[in-house]
Image (cartoon, grey):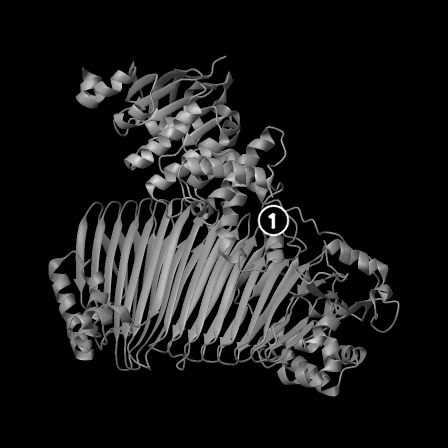
Amino acid sequence: MAEEIRIDKGLTKTITEFAPHHYHIEVEKGATLYHYRLGKFNPKDDRNSELIVDVAENAKYVGCLVLLDDAPANLKVQINLKGKGASCDSDAIYLGSGKQKYNLALIANHEASDTVSLQKAKGIMKDASSMDFQGLINIKEGVAKISGDQLHEAILLSDTAKVKCAPELAIASEDVKCTHGSSIGMLDESALFYMESRGISKPEAKALLLKAFVLEILNKIAHEKTRDDFTAEVEKWLTKNI
Amino acid sequence: MEKDKKKSLSKLADTKYKYGFISDIDSEDFPIGLNEDIIRLISKKKAEPSWLLDFRLKAFCHWQKMKEPTWAKVHYPKIDYQSIYYYASPKLKNKNAPKSLDEVDPKLLAIYDKLGVPLKEREALAGVVAVDAVMDSVSVTTTYKAKLEAQGIIFCSFSEAVKNHPDLVKKYLGSVVPYTDNFFAALNSAVFSDGSFVFIPKGVRCPIELSTYFRINAAKTGQFERTLIVADEGAYVSYLEGCTAPQRDENQLHAAVVEIVVLKDAEVKYSTVQNWFPGDEFGKGGIYNFVTKRGLCAGANAKLSWTQVETGSAITWKYPSCVLKGDGSIGEFNSVALTSHYQQADTGTKMIHLGKNTRSTIIAKSIAAGNSSSTYRGLVKMAKTATAGNNFSRCDNLIIGNKSKTYTVPVMESANPSAKIGHEATTSKISDEQLFFCRQRGLSEEEAISLIVNGFCKEVMQKLPMEFAMEATKLIQVSLEGVSIG
Amino acid sequence: MSFFEIKDLVAGTEDKTILSGFNLSINKGEVHAIMGPNGTGKSTLANIICGNPKYKITSGKIIFKDKDISTLSVDERAHLGLFLGFQNPVEIEGISVITFLKYAVNAKRKFEGKDKIAAPDFLKMIKVRATALGISDEMLKRPLNVGFSGGEKKRIETLQMAVLEPDFCILDEMDSGLDIDALKVVSDGVNVLAKDKTRAFLLITHYDRLLTLIKPDFVHIMNGGKIVKTGDENLAKELEAKGYQGIING
């Protein structure tokens, strides 16, 4: 049961919500949608969330999805760049602890020329949590002047946490510039050492670096109140878990 | 200008396959098809011990229960396994293997000449390559056996190894690629004809590049070679594999298995320059290349590197892999895959990190032209035990023309917090700026594209042993253009 | 024979006309400079002369050595003796400077019906010219322009010009981003080639600085896609004093 939302021609709208569910959103010609979602699991909702966004000519979708322990487990964000000049900037942060299992798919379909997609996902996983991440930049045949970028970074904090990452590129057109980058690992040792050498304790340094890791995405949120609210929730999780 | 560009680009994808000739050596053929009797016949013909026949039969039994995989992004007409000859050996003057080159059928030698296989022994040690030539399914001759034997190095055909070193073969056969591994490995384990066997004893550094050439000749003869390479502790060997195939109308099946075992402190370098016939401009008649290649770094600090340049075969399905079991072991995969016309390639690598402090590097370059499709599929897995494991992969795709497609599917899995996996990929076309620049310096469009593609592949080509690198560079040029500026 | 002439050229991209009725005539042995505000089409002019497929000619002619070159391909124009010193030379991974030069030299020799150049002759030729331009052996081995500073890139452009010995050189903002030393090296390279008066040069620049080192016979001010004023080296000095608006309006 997907909720239908339409952002009318030329308008700019911001939606902030605390329980991602199923959506089909149409961002019409020249419109811009800022879409912020923080995961909080409502027992009434199912554990899945599917978001499909159709972006029309010269329209833009800017999204940020933050997943905490109580978020739905299976999420898909699919952005269809349907019109010439359409673009999207779609980010996700995921934080897992306990036995939380995530399955996240971030998809950008380039169906028209002159389209740009930016997708960034960052995650911190501890305890026995696990993430199965699929990223996809899909470029249709016959479109030109495409720019697609995808970045995924994950940090594992325990012996039992797991991350699987499959960033895919499916390209059927010549006139494209696509990059994707992925890394799974731990905090930068040299950064930790640097902070400790300046008198900061190891746990504090760890916390600071982890905070900086996710803050990079949170600071992009244009809407001030949303940014503050989301940052507060993330800091709460970090304080509790690090 | 755009029209000109399209015209030259389509000319570029026009491959003139210079090795396309058919040799009319009489093949000693088996009855067609596959069943238990054929397998017993193969084993009997090669006078194999019963344990090997057992191995084949078990594999065949298992194969019959398996389903052909369909997940690779390649499409091909269904293979009728019953309409293939599973054994073909060229008729020899003697029933036994020739003891010297004088005993080999001159027609055969002429073919090897055409292929550029150096069967004559060369005096100088520098740049010497020992060649274990495989013609269809049976090894014909082995060069330099004596010199290598003096150091305790065994380099011979698989059939010979079964006869002369059965313990070694028995110990390692199927230890890296069991017949249960996949559909084509099971088929191969049942009907494999011949291949190479290499054993380097403790602490020995093999002084020459080992190489093998083989061709598929008889129509409808699928080639199922089996190669086993074992490097004992502290040993080193560099092995080259290169092959050509004649022009044929029917598709030809090639399902090989290569197993490599690298023990403590040993190193194996395996290089492949693959030059199968890719099918004509309409995609008709090329080679189906389904290969399972895997290496096990069994001991501490073992090192295995795979380097490949793939430009042929109608359909390629291969994922050379490394299992990094020994602590501190290192795996490397360097690849250039060039597809044009209607070729389909689905290739990549698997790096499985099990031990501590293991390291792997993947550099994969693909160039897709014409109507081809090129898929890179990678798997990097850090098991729970892979403490301080480290991987870096880089996949770059170059698309030439508007009709080709590329897919990049790198999968990374980590279950160890101290392990690091890093991956970067880019896809682009040859930039208009680069083309314009080269042309303004007087290079034709074909020359410019060839130059840029060469630069694109340089990182991988540098890992090949020198004579191979030259052949590989030439191969890229032949596949890309009609005129070479050398 | 008409060495180089542009007649009533109307040209630009698919969407925009950039040159609107451009005229210019250059004789062998002459050094011309074109100056003008940003966006007025100077680089476009250089690219169009050399045949960059990004641009289209609507009407008009480009004559070089009595030939209408507007239908020739980029490399065909290069073989005739045309050279473009790029404003932002492109990077090509995996191909060293010296390897690239060899390809270019052999492409020219092929056009002239000659055999490929022998390796020792080639190396000797390169060394001499590279040393004169302050280019080290190490730089010659690096991949073409990858990670090179602006000054290094322009030295390599100048080296290519010295090696290929073209008849008509268009240098697109060769001086941008160069310090005094690099500028001197590049200018010396140009002056050496200009000395015997068998070639022609077209320098595109913003600054008088380059023109004090390479003496122009003619200076043209370009605006709105065509030449609006022509003078000698003094015009460049006047431009320094008055600025473009001063010259164009005054």
Determine whether B243 is above or below C66 in the image: below
Q: Judge by depth and name the residue closer to the eye, B434 or C181.
A: C181
Q: Amino acid at mark 1?
A: Ser
Counting from the top left corner in percent of width and height, residue C128 is at 48, 36
Q: Chain of mark 1?
A: B
Instruction: State which quadrant residue C22 falls in.
Output: top left
Instruction: State which quadrant residue C5 falls in.
Output: top left
User: What residue lies at 55% left-to-right and 59% top-to-bottom?
Assistant: B345
Q: Judge by depth and name the residue closer to the eye, B318 or B36.
A: B318
User: What residue lies at 53% left-to-right and 57% top-to-bottom?
Assistant: B462
- Secondary element type, mark 1: helix
User: What residue lies at 42% left-to-right and 44% top-to-bottom?
Assistant: C136
Task: State the quadrant of the C terminus of chain B.
Answer: top right
Q: How many dots with numbers?
A: 1
Counting from the top left corner in percent of width and height, residue A20 is at 23, 67
Specify whether B22 is left or right of B11: right
Instruction: State which quadrant residue B160 falls in.
Output: bottom right
Give the residue at the far top of this rendering: C1
Q: Is residue B403 visible?
A: no
Specify whether C82 is left or right of A180: right
Characterize the local packing of mark 1: few (<14), some (14-19) or many (20 or more) Cα atoms within 10 angstroms. many
Counting from the top left corner in percent of width and height, residue B255 is at 65, 68
Per the image, the residue denoted by label 1 is B479
Specify whether A191 is left or right of B310: left
Q: Is residue A116 visible?
A: yes
Counting from the top left corner in percent of width and height, residue C190 is at 40, 27
Q: Judge by depth and name the residue closer to the eye, C4 or C181.
A: C181
